[in-house]
Amino acid sequence: MSGGNGDGQSAEDLAAAWGAETDGADGEVSVQPARVLNQAEIDSLLGFDDGPGDGENRTGMQRIISSGLVSYERLPMLEIVFDRLVRIMSTSLRNFTSDNVEVGIDNILSLRFGDYLNSIPLPAMLAVFKAEEWDNYGLMVVDSTLIYSIVDVLLGGRRGTAAMRIEGRPYTTIERTLVERLIHVVLADLSVSFDPLCPVTFRFERLEVNPRFATISRLSNAAVLARLRIDMEDRGGRLELLLPYATLEPVRELLLQQFMGEKFGRDSIWETHLAEELWNTEIDLDVVLDEQTMRLSDVMALQPGSRIVLNTQINAVVQLRCGGTTLFEARIGKRKNCMAVRIEREVPRVVVFDR
């Protein structure tokens, strides 16, 4: 074996070493104990030694691991809607709880609906709501910390004491009722946040505690998730809003705008200029004196000097065409030794739709 390091060994050296390890003295194959890979070799095998790869630099294993991630188009106006929701909710929840409430947005991301259902920390309350105008559904998740904080605040808990959490029991009717009131407030604020973009009403449907019963979309479908943080001095929690892309499809074009009221291809100056140029456009009008149907053999037999007799006389009705469109009917006549036509009437254009 050559004296170079392990990385510089040639293929022949590796083959010789393998043969020396596997061949016994009598030519039989000897079984060697399996070598255990260390952490560095495992990371190198999985492609994690150089950090996460992006684009074409990712290894095959990294592509398999990241196959569950969702590639989605950015919706600029949706981010503005959620920013507006944060401002409105800060005021609404202060009036709702009679306490100092601060609402912030942690992040907005895209993921598959099934992956999100599996990642919901339980216990939690899952509110299913419907967008009436879009005829589809969304999901709101209130974590247990926020549930107990809201119950503590609404029932007169003293400030400066953390909300008491009692795990291992189902939520009571009082807790569910108080959380439903919070959900109605948030849904009303979400409707107001969408108003500058398009009117939509979010209606509360039902409250679930099991993610299996809150399935509103296929598990493989993509969805937008907004994580909100609600702080009430030393109390608070997290609230998450999930809107499937199928729900947002009716207003997708509006959400793709860079700013409110953005319109493409609308310019009054250009429209006026185009109209003026169209009025000054020159077109060719063809006077169809006669149309005849001939056999192909007769057409092929035509020679220079052959005559085609037109069955049109003076004062006969002819057609004026522009391209293949008939525009007018006219009568043929003479004026100063020249053939002329006088327009009699305009031919209505018929629009034909292909099935």
Image: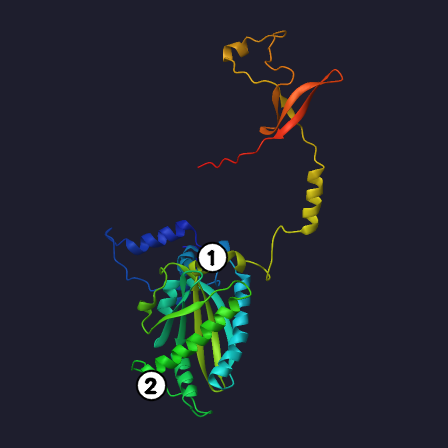
Q: What residue type is labelled 2?
A: Ile
Residue 129 found in image quarter: bottom left
Query: In the rendered image, which quarter contains the C terminus?
Result: top left
Query: In the rendered image, which quarter contains the N terminus?
Result: bottom left
Q: Which residue position holds label 2?
A: 166
The image shows a total of numbered marks equal to 2
Counting from the top left corner in percent of width and height, residue 323 is at 61, 28
Q: Horizontally, is 60 left or right of 281 in the view?
A: left
Counting from the top left corner in percent of width and height, residue 178 is at 39, 81
Residue 213 found in image quarter: bottom left
* Label 2 Cα neighbours within 10 Å, binned few <14 / some 14-19 / many ≥20: few
Q: Horizontally, is 42 left or right of 324 in the view?
A: left
Counting from the top left corner in percent of width and height, residue 89 is at 51, 76
Counting from the top left corner in percent of width and height, residue 266 is at 63, 51
* Label 1 Cα neighbours within 10 Å, binned few <14 / some 14-19 / many ≥20: some
Q: Residue at x 40, y 88 (%)?
A: 155
Secondary structure, mark 1, is helix
Q: Work out whether residue 54 can be spotted.
A: no
Residue 250's disc number:
1
The nearer-to-camera label among 2 and 1 is 1
Q: Which amino acid does label 1 sit on?
A: Pro
Residue 302 found in image quarter: top right
Residues at circles 2 and 1 in contact by the CB criterion of under 8 Å: no
Which residue is more in the foreground, 216 or 92? 92
Secondary structure, mark 2, is loop
Which residue is more in the foreground, 31 or 314? 314
Residue 186's disc number:
none
Does residue 33 sit above or below 176 in this rendering?
above
Which colour style is shown? rainbow
